[in-house]
């Protein structure tokens, strides 16, 4: 922790005009776990509402526990925190809080992960999870034109059989959530849980016509990125920063413009990098990869979209042109229909012209 604080404090501050440029930049968020948006204040409020006892005396004490050494040390707290989510209203409140926060960062479209197994394992019905998240997203779409989609993610530390059971439980809801549920993802502990473990269930999801993504190359080796592409047939790689260790893979990612949903503050907090100035985001971008910036689990990692953009802009000294490339890559990498995508890209062009 000390090292992180020091490295941040030695990074030169961003110029005021670059800060306001980032704040106003229209953004798409493609790597966001809704359970990772549960801020300590809301977590405490829900614990109280649902009579769940927490092993922390205060919001400050909980926040102080967010000092992670690796992915697993985070996942332990993240799954424990999700236990306060019990009712449809809880999922609604969490999702609405994320919408309010991300609209303030000028996020124009979000493709949001949720982990039903985290909840069904605790006896929460899968319908409750879908209903609460969807109610908030639909309300935001109607009231504010906030565009979104949801990606149901399987927990890779659990079995493929468990993933199949989750898919079977969710499929009857597909028609009801057709306006939102567009894809399937794969998250949780990467090391030791390679993509092949989920080859059959991803093949089934592919037949069903879902968009496919998977976390790969966060803590796991570049081989997992290749296997996510070749065995699971994913369209985007979540994280993917370790791809840099394999030059042939880098070439392929650049040539095929396979989007990487990179999460800078997450990488720093989970010690994937030990100093933001050493983050490879700029190198990946300059190598021609379709890099995007995302917040992953913002309540745990210290910032939403703008904070992630600011962190890389300051530490990697990114130019406006590079920041716009990152924003553009994200709009291009969305699973939106062509017309909606084009409209957002035009909005981005308009912003750049005016600034
Ligand atoms: N990696 C893997 N699983 C996760 C993450 C992550 O960054 N965030 C939430 N679940
Ligand atoms: Zn993630």
Image (spheres, rainbow, N blue to C red):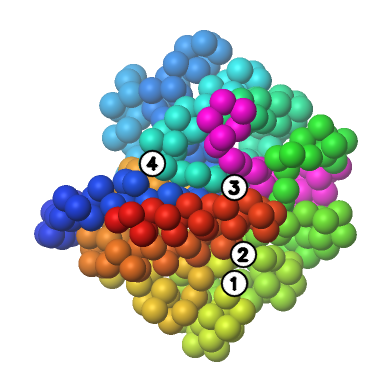
Marks 1/3: CA–CA distance: 17 Å
From the top left corner, tell me how far across and down residue 156 is, in percent. 66, 54
Labels 2 & 3 near each other (Cβ < 8 A) = no
Q: Which residue is mark 4?
A: 105
Count of numbered tags: 4
Image position of 85 (left or right of 73): right
Image position of 316 (left or right of 76): left
Q: Nearer the viewer, mark 1 or mark 4?
A: 4
In the rendered structure, find residue 236 and report the number of the disc placed on it: 2
Marks 2/4: CA–CA distance: 23 Å
167, above or below 195, in the image? above
- Residue that appears at 52% across and 11% down: 49
Labels 1 & 3 near each other (Cβ < 8 A) = no
- Residue that appears at 27% across and 61% down: 313
> Which image quadrant: the C terminus?
bottom left
Image position of 222 (left or right of 70): right
Instruction: Determine whether the residue tagged by mark 3 lies in a helix, strand or loop.
Output: strand
- Residue that appears at 54% across and 45% down: 109
Looking at marks 2 and 3 on the same chain, the residue that comes earlier in the sequence is marked by 3
Mark 3 burial class by Cα count in 10 Å: few <14, some 14-19, many 20+? many
Looking at marks 2 and 1 on the same chain, the residue that comes earlier in the sequence is marked by 2
Q: Which residues are magenta?
A: 141-168
Q: Which residue is mark 3?
A: 111
- Residue that appears at 36% across and 59% down: 353
């Amino acid at each position: 922790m000390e090292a992180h604080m020091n490295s941040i404090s030695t990074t030169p501050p961003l110029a005021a005009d670059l800060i306001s440029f980032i704040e106003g930049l229209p953004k798409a968020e493609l790597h966001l776990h809704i359970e990772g948006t549960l801020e300590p204040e809301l977590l405490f409020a829900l614990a109280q509402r649902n009579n769940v006892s927490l092993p922390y005396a205060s919001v400050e004490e909980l926040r102080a526990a967010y000092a992670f050494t690796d992915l697993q040390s985070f996942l332990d707290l993240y799954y424990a925190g999700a236990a306060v989510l019990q009712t449809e209203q809880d999922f609604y409140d969490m999702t609405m809080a994320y919408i309010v926060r991300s609209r303030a960062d000028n996020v124009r479209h979000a493709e949001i992960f949720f982990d039903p197994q985290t909840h069904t394992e605790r006896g929460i019905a899968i319908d409750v999870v879908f209903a609460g998240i969807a109610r908030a997203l639909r309300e935001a779409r109607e009231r504010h034109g906030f565009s979104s989609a949801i990606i149901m993610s399987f927990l890779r530390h659990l079995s493929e059989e468990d993933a199949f059971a989750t898919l079977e439980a969710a499929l009857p809801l597909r028609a009801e959530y057709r306006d939102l549920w567009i894809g399937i993802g794969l998250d949780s502990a990467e090391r030791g849980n390679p993509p092949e473990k989920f080859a059959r269930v991803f093949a089934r999801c592919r037949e069903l016509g879902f968009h496919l993504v998977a976390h790969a190359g966060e803590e796991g080796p570049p081989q997992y990125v290749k296997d996510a592409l070749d065995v699971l047939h994913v369209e985007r790689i979540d994280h993917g920063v370790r791809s840099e260790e394999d030059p042939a893979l880098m070439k392929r990612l650049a040539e095929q413009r396979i989007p990487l949903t990179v999460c800078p503050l997450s990488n720093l907090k989970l010690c994937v990098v030990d100093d933001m100035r050493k983050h490879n985001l700029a190198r990946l971008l300059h190598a021609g990869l379709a890099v995007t910036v995302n917040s992953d689990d913002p309540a745990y990692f210290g910032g939403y979209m703008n904070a992630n953009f600011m962190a890389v802009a300051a530490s990697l000294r990114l130019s406006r042109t590079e920041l716009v490339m990152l924003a553009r890559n994200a709009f291009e990498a969305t699973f939106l229909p062509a017309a909606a995508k084009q409209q957002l890209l035009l909005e981005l062009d308009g912003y750049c012209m005016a600034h």
